[in-house]
Image (cartoon, grey):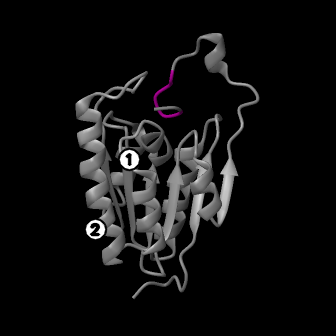
Amino acid sequence: MSKLKKGYVQIYTGGGKGKTTAAIGLALRATGAGLKVFIAQFVKGMKYSELDALEKHKDKITVKQYGRDCFIHNDPKKEDIEAAQKGFKEVKEIINNGKHDLVILDEACIAIYYDLFSESDLINVIKNRPGHVEIVITGRKASEKLLEIADLVTEMKEIKHYYTAGVQARLGIEK
């Protein structure tokens, strides 16, 4: 039985850094309260340091990646679409079975932007989920329809970033 009486829909979007980091922080907070968490990382197949940290909490946090080990720069490849659709099918079952209190759909906004899976399918899953399941959706370019159905929307806005000065992603900070 979930400790959450009602689950809400949260979106972390925008062009600034910190969307995934915020979602993972929430996942850790949730496990501290005894909640069970599933993190689906769409469009990601690379090794990130958070995966090593989350491995230490694998009894309460499950993480699965549904992407290749590279970024989508322009047009998605067939493998990108297949990985995301396979992931969406699995995530739909995970949400519907209600065994996880918090389900994080990391980079789902970008997956929808690149038509890796359907926005209407995601909205349908959200609207028909068990009432206690909290959903967090991250990624740039959140659609207007997703923003409308969300209960909480946080926009990460880049004001200044050292990336523009040529600093590459650093181990433990950005990757």
Q: Amino acid at mark 2?
A: Glu
Residue segment shown in magenta: 169-173
Predominant SS of the magenta segment = loop
Circle 2 sits in a helix, a strand or a loop, which is it? helix
Residue at the image position 42 percent from the left and 22 percent from the top: 74
- Counting from the top left corner in percent of width and height, residue 82 is at 23, 41
Which of discs 1 and 2 lies nearer the camera? The answer is 2
Q: Which residue is mark 1?
A: 41
Q: Residue at x 45, y 32 (%)?
A: 175
As drawn, is 52 to the left or to the right of 9? left
Outermost residue to the front: 120
Q: Is residue 77 left or right of residue 26?
A: left
* Figure check: 99 above or below 136: below
Is residue 16 left or right of 56 when viewed as pictured? Answer: right
* Residue placed most toward the observer, 169 or 13: 13
Mark 2: few/some/many CA within 10 Å (<14, 14-19, 20+) = few
Position above or below: 81 against 35: above
Instruction: Tell me the kind of residue under disc 1.
Output: Gln
Earlier residue among tags 1 and 2: 1
Is 129 part of what is drawn in magenta? no
Return the x and y of residue 26 as percentages of the image width and height: 55, 60
Residue 94's spot in the image, x, y percent? Answer: 31, 68
Q: Secondary structure at mark 1?
A: strand
Q: Which residue is mark 2?
A: 93
Q: 10 Å neighbourhood of mark 1: few (<14), some, or many (≥20)? A: many
Where does the image place residue 19, in percent across and percent down from the top left?
57, 45
91 or 115: nearer the eye? 115
Mark 1 and mark 2 residues within 8 Å of each other at the beta carbon: no
Disc tally is 2
